[in-house]
Amino acid sequence: MFDVIIIGAGVIGSSIAMHLSQYKMKVLVLEKNPEACMETSKANSGIIHAGYDAVRGSLKEKLNVECSLEMEALSKRLHFLYKKIGSLLVFREDEKEVAELLYKEGLERGIPGIRLIDQEELREKEPHLCHDYVGALYAPSAAIVCPFQLTYSLLENAIQNGVSFHSMEEVKSIDKVDNSFLVTTQKNSYQTRYVMNAAGVKADQISAFIGDNSFTITPRRGEYRVLDHTEDHKVKHILFQIPTPHSKGVLALPTVHGNLLLGPTSVLQDSRTAKPMTEEGLAEISLHREKLFPEMNLEEKTIRIFSGLRATSSEGDFIIRESSVPGFFHAAGIDSPGLSSAFSIGKMITELLLEKEYFEMKEDYLATNPEYRNLSDYPLSVQKEMIQENPEYGIPLCRCEDVSLADVKNAIGRPLGARTIGGVKRRVRPGSGRCQGGFCEEKIAEILAQELDISLEEVYKENALWIKGDKHV
Ligand SMILES: Cc1cc2nc3c(=O)[nH]c(=O)nc-3n(C[C@H](O)[C@H](O)[C@H](O)COP(=O)(O)OP(=O)(O)OC[C@H]3O[C@@H](n4cnc5c(N)ncnc54)[C@H](O)[C@@H]3O)c2cc1C
């Protein structure tokens, strides 16, 4: 019998797992995919928002503001990339009023250092930006993170503190049996006293298993273009445009690894599966690129396109509560700013559980994770020593992103090790560069097979098995 089963290993399920792992309880995370972080948590802008624009009094406002203040310390404790680069909400003359209103909101919410800047300062900060913009709302506390590293580090911390993680187990039904739940996947049935629903765009379907139809989730697609490293220097901050009622608009920002990201769009869709990029999405991003950076060559510089699904709830806010069925909790409708609020969402739902039942804290809770860095993160003198100690650091695997054989093996061997080609890429970056895996993908597949002691035919690329030479999985 488990104390808690968490359904879903995105950033929210992983944060819940990390918080619960501080207490003496038996916890299991169930994930339908081959790995954690393969849905919305892997396909977003990676922004830790300053928190000036969520609806007043909403959970989104409270948890974003709270969490953004915690993120830097958390990044040091769990070792994920975090860069406080600040955001600029750029405006034209006729948009100034909206920016002023948001500035007032920011001041009232205590957003650190928020201020309006004029065109001269904007030009200094972003010299490549179109000159039509006359000023910006500057929020220096806004930051970028690696969303994959954030998710992995939360779950890895939970695992090293005793939480069990079962991937490739899709929850198919949940039955209330006396004072517990029977959670059934395609492989097993598990009994648990409490359930945490962190199933992203499928959270309403999970809720329906126990007869709670109090909310629905509508997926809202967001599409992106990723540009190569030659464009890095052109954007230094997170550049927002004036928001629309449904999204923060198409934006431009650097990723923590130095690629320029343009997107996302915002389109409602019926299917719960993220589609590849659409023609309309590409066209919309091009239009915004023209507005922001008229001189940028988007076609030549794009190395990847992708999309993610926001889990928009019928309640217009995060749904974090115990359901009408006692013992069953929701962390649902976690669309943006979900990443920016993840730590606080995990904390809040843990507190809701602790209000129901007392659990003792562990005396031996490990608050930090081991740090994993690639060979290329170290200065040359250290690299030499590392290669002497382990010659596999000297065997290059991905030349675009400078990744060695030892880096890839580390990614597979760590407590929450990679199980797919995509998982290796999200941990140590082979395949993230200009060639997008053209040169190293087969090699990565062979190493996964060897390290996991499986055949090449059993290696997953993402959700589907890897097929040699197939670029479309
Ligand atoms: C385009 C876009 C841009 C965004 N940008 C930002 C941003 O810059 N900053 C920000 O703060 N937020 C942003 N967000 C929001 C943020 O990405 C999400 O709030 C967050 O990733 C949601 O995490 P999650 O764990 O709830 O969902 P997910 O990551 O989708 O995780 C849910 C998990 O549940 C699993 N699951 C579902 N059903 C089952 C089942 N039956 N059995 C087992 N497992 C199941 C899924 O496989 C999945 O792994 C953005 C979102 C999108 C789409």
Image: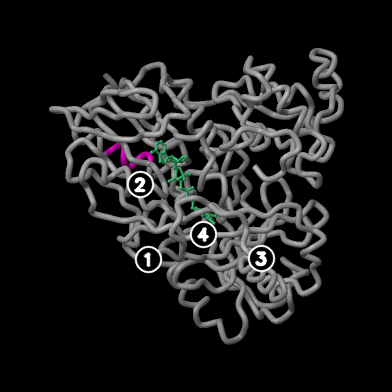
Q: Is residue 372 visible?
A: yes
Which is closer to the viewer, label 2 or label 1?
Answer: 2
The quarter of the image holding the C terminus is top right
Q: Say whether mark 2 is within 8 Å of ligand 1.
A: yes
Cβ–Cβ under 8 Å for marks 2 and 4 = no
Numbered circle sitting on residue 55? 1
The Cα atoms of the two marked residues, 3 and 1, are separated by 30 Å
Tell me where residue 179 sits by quadrant.
top left
Q: Going 58% across and 50% down the picture, which residue do you hit?
A: 46
* Residue to which mark 2 is pinned: 203
Which is closer to the viewer, label 4 or label 1?
Answer: 4
Q: Is residue 340 visible?
A: no
Secondary element under disc 2, as helix, strand or loop, is helix
Secondary element under disc 1, as helix, strand or loop, is loop
Going from N to C along the chain, the mark reached first, 3 or 2, is: 2
Q: Amino acid at mark 2?
A: Ala
The Cα atoms of the two marked residues, 2 and 1, are separated by 22 Å
Which is closer to the viewer, label 3 or label 1?
Answer: 3
Going from N to C along the chain, the mark reached first, 4 or 1, is: 1
Q: Amino acid at mark 3?
A: Leu
* Residue to which mark 3 is pinned: 282
Q: Residue furthest top?
A: 389
Going from N to C along the chain, the mark reached first, 3 or 1, is: 1
Secondary element under disc 4, as helix, strand or loop, is strand
Going from N to C along the chain, the mark reached first, 2 or 4, is: 2
